[in-house]
Amino acid sequence: MTGAGENGGRAVDVFLRYLKAEGAEVVFGVPGGLLHPLFAAVENAPDLRLVVTKHEEGAAFMADGFARTGGRLAVCAGTSGPGSTNLLTGVSCAFADGVPMLVVTGQAASGAIGKGAAQEAGREDIDIVAMFDPVTKYSAMVVSPGSLAHHLRRALRLALTGRPGPVHLNVPVDLWEKPVEEQWFEPSSYRPETSLFDRRRVQQAAEAMIAARYPAILVGSGVGIASATDHLRALAELLSARVATTPRGKGLFPEDHPLSLGVLGFAGHSPAKDTILGDEVDLLFTAGASLNETTTLNWDRRLRPRETLVQLDIDPDRIGRNYPVEIPLVGDAQTILVELVYHLHRLIRDGASPGSAWGDEAPIERNIYTNPDLRVSDAVPVTPQRWRVDLEEVLPDDVTIFSDIGGHMLFNIHHLRIKEGQRLVINMGFGSMGHGTAAPIGAALADPGRPVIAIVGDGCFAMNGMELLTAREHDIPVTWIVENNNMHGITWHGTRRVGSGRPMESARFRKTVEIAAIARAMGLGAWVVERPGQMQQAMSEALKSGGPAVIEVRVDAEISPPVEDRARAVEGFIAGR
Ligand SMILES: Cc1ncc(C[n+]2csc(CCOP(=O)(O)OP(=O)(O)O)c2C)c(N)n1
Ligand SMILES: [Mg+2]
């Protein structure tokens, strides 16, 4: 391969050189004629890996999983026309949750655009640039080989600065192999690493925090994106503040910590709800939480503390969006938390002492689960609660757990305790089924030293489960637990709680499916769990196998997930409340 030196090479060589400089290791995608030169170059690049997925949506989900856990640039690509429309849902997921990703799509040759080339998707018919525009931070067609690097640097700058997000470049097929004369830019020279904060506001926040009698913290996913979990914990301990997380932030503050209130929001825990929506809290500090419907239980007004709401967000547009804020802190969570902790230490050194009076109150209730009896039930088939309790016994301390979307996610939020060092990933913003099935493959590639498992429903598995073949082909060791209730459980149980109370019977599948048999046919190791006490061995063996594996759990489908909050919200929306 011709390397892109200071003075050039082919456009595609310059392009790959930037990807490598940004830490990209993998390109996920499905090839097609209009993208061929890029795929051919990636395949031949010694330090890049081309992972051909079964569906472009899977490629976008995998890139998303790679970025969420790897903390570096992820790339996915699809050909023009259907390749790009297939990418769209995955890209939207990344946009909703602020995940950086470079999306590349193919295009007809520059001289043929507008003449009706096969799969052409230009301005006059399926306008792909416009299609990606609302779900990316930048979407552009590259119109000349000489401007490719310019557009790429701009796209990378936007993807990786501020609130991260996906960016899209559409490249006519004839541009890739054209020679270019290029001046090389190091990433640090086109992409600012900013760590801005407002000193006055941080001081004001520190003073309010140290004076608070009943301080509480709500931890959102932004704390995870900023790698600020340790800093947040130091702050909470310094203030003796009680700490809840959002559903998406679940686990960013260890749920086995004495200050943990659990999750606030859908399928959350009563200590979080009673405390944060109660009337004791005088100062609430929300960190990297967008305060959306799922967290605030439909924007419950009682979330406002008695005196001071301190809201930290990297995006000023999120500040004061849903609740009036006394002290706004705009910026990266880690940068600001470092400053806050510094100021708190300074105040303490100058004689102040934290005012927290929580210690005089009743300790946080530890029996936080609805239906605690179902957690210890010996019934067969196993209850959804019981196998999760069994699972906790054998999960590695550093496991990354992906959850897909459905009733199983609500069970995961409520019944799975995420301990220190463990991590949970849910595409909560967009809530797309299938993300939790495909994205863990990207995560396992990004961080091969860390075990990755996924808990998905049978409905989600049916949508994107073919990507397990991708894992098999590349020997990517993800263990999928497929909770088989033979239905869209969230819909069936949810519809029993709204309107007439008649369950939507069409959401129950008409025939049973043996997920483990499908997995075996795909060449994966497979286990079936039907009884209490079987999960421990199945998971231990699956992890030990070192390859991709499936554990099908046949659960008691009559047991409802904790769907009440979601049902109430949907009912309110339908009624226009
Ligand atoms: C792409 C997409 N389509 C539809 C939905 C709406 N939806 C949310 S969960 C769900 C059913 C999930 O079924 P399954 O994976 O079996 O999970 P269960 O509720 O049974 O645990 C549906 C249809 C969605 N979130 N995403
Ligand atoms: Mg199901």
Image (cartoon, rainbow, N blue to C red):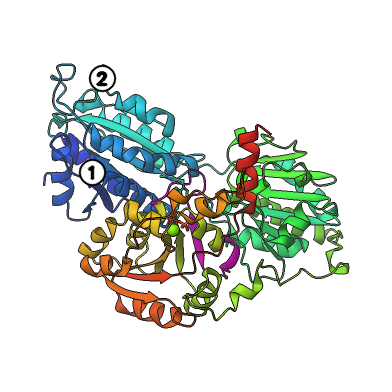
Displayed quadrant of residue 197:
top right
Residue 77 higher or lower than 548, as above or below: above
Q: Badge 2 is on which residue? A: 125
Q: CA distance from mark 1 to mark 2?
A: 30 Å
Q: How many marks can you see?
A: 2
Q: Which mark is residue 16?
A: 1
Classed neighbour count for the residue bearing mark 1: other residues with Cα under 10 Å, few (<14), some (14–19), many (≥20): some
Please tell me whether mark 1 or mark 2 is closer to you in this view: 2
Say whether residue 5 is visible.
Answer: no
User: How would you classify the magenta stretch by its main secondary structure?
Assistant: loop
Rendered residue at 26%/16% (across/down): 124
Q: Are marks 1 and 2 in contact (CB under 8 Å)?
A: no
Is residue 274 left or right of 319 when viewed as pictured?
A: right
Measured as percent of width and height from the top left, residue 299 is found at 69, 41
**Quick check: which quadrant has ligand 2?**
bottom left
**Kind of element beneath mark 2:** loop
Q: Nearer the viewer, residue 122 or 487?
A: 487
Q: Is residue 415 magenta?
A: yes
Measured as percent of width and height from the top left, residue 87 is found at 31, 40
Displayed quadrant of residue 238:
bottom right
Is residue 314 left or right of 78 when viewed as pictured?
A: right
Determine if the C-beta at disc 1 is less than 8 A from ligand 1.
no
Rendered residue at 64%/50% (across/down): 565
Q: Specify the segment rendered in magenta.
A: 413-434
Q: In terms of sequence position, does the residue under pointer 1 or pointer 2 come before the other?
A: 1
**Kind of element beneath mark 1:** helix
Is residue 342 left or right of 332 when viewed as pictured?
A: right
Measured as percent of width and height from the top left, residue 149 is found at 27, 33
